[in-house]
C-alpha cells in the first residue's frame, strides 16, 4: 500500500466514524485511531474452512471513556462503503457495551455474546438510517 492509498483509506474510516460518533453518543469518549497498512487477522467461521479478514478492532476502557480503534487498511481497501460503514458501527457498539463484560478473566464465552449484541445493534442502527432516508420514520 502506497502513501496515497494509505491516506485514502484512513479518510474513508474517519469519515464514517465522524458521521456516526455523535448519533451514537461517542463524542464524550477519547478515541484514538491506530492505522495498520496490512490486512487484518483472519478469523475462521464455525463449521467450515471459510474465513474473513478483520477490518477493525476496538479496545476500550469504559471507566475512563477511552477507546482505541485499530484499522487494518489492507483489508479496508477491499470492502464497499456499506461494508465499511457496517463494520465501523459494529465496532462502535463494542465501545458502548464493553462495560457489560462479565467473565473476561475467567475464559467464559463473553466475547461471543458481545459480538452477537454488537452485530444486532449495528444492523438495527443501519436499518433505522435506511428507513429515515426513505421517509419511513
Image (tube, helix red, strand yellow):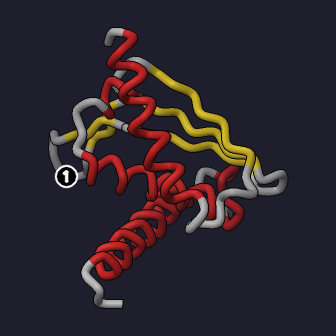
Asked if one can make out residue 115 in the rendered structure from this viewpoint, the answer is yes
Q: Pointer 1: what residue?
A: 47
Q: Position of residue 78 (x, y in %)?
A: 22, 33
Residue 130 position by quadrant: bottom left
Residue 77 appears left or right of 33: left
* Label 1 residue SS: loop
Which residue corresponds to the image point at 77% horizontal and 53% vertical from the top-left?
65
Along the line of sight, the residue nearer the viewer: 129 or 88: 129
Indicate the quadrant containing the N terminus: top left, top right, bottom left or bottom right.
top left
Which residue corresponds to the image point at 36% horizontal and 26% vertical from the top-left?
8
Number of marks: 1
Which residue corresponds to the image point at 60% horizontal and 50% vertical from the top-left?
107
Q: Position of residue 72 (x, y in %)?
A: 41, 29
Indicate the quadrant containing the C terminus: top left, top right, bottom left or bottom right.
bottom left
Residue 96 position by quadrant: bottom right
Outermost residue toward the top in this view: 2
Q: Taking 52 as reference, is 4 above or below it?
A: above
Q: Taking 23 as reference, is 33 above or below it?
A: above
Outermost residue toward the left in this view: 49
Q: Residues within 10 Å of mark 1 (few under 14, many from 20)?
A: few
Outermost residue toward the right in this view: 64
Residue 53 appears left or right of 7: left
Which residue corresponds to the image point at 33% horizontal and 38% vertical from the top-left?
43
Q: Position of residue 76 (x, y in %)?
A: 32, 34
Asked if one can make out residue 40 in the rendered structure from this viewpoint, the answer is no
Q: Position of residue 112 (x, y in %)?
A: 46, 59
Amino acid at each position: 500500500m502506497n502513501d496515497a492509498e494509505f491516506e485514502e483509506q484512513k479518510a474513508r474510516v474517519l469519515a464514517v466514524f465522524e458521521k456516526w460518533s455523535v448519533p451514537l453518543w461517542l463524542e464524550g469518549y477519547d478515541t484514538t485511531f491506530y492505522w495498520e497498512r496490512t490486512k487484518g487477522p483472519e478469523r475462521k467461521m464455525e463449521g467450515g474452512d471459510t474465513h474473513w479478514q478483520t477490518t477493525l478492532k476496538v479496545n476500550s476502557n469504559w471507566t475512563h471513556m477511552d477507546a482505541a480503534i485499530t484499522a487494518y487498511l489492507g483489508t479496508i481497501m477491499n470492502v464497499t462503503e456499506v461494508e465499511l460503514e457496517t463494520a465501523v458501527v459494529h465496532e462502535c457498539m463494542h465501545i458502548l457495551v464493553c462495560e457489560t463484560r462479565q467473565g473476561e478473566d475467567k475464559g467464559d464465552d463473553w466475547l461471543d455474546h458481545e459480538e452477537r449484541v454488537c452485530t444486532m445493534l449495528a444492523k438495527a442502527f443501519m436499518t433505522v438510517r435506511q428507513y429515515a432516508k426513505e421517509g419511513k420514520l
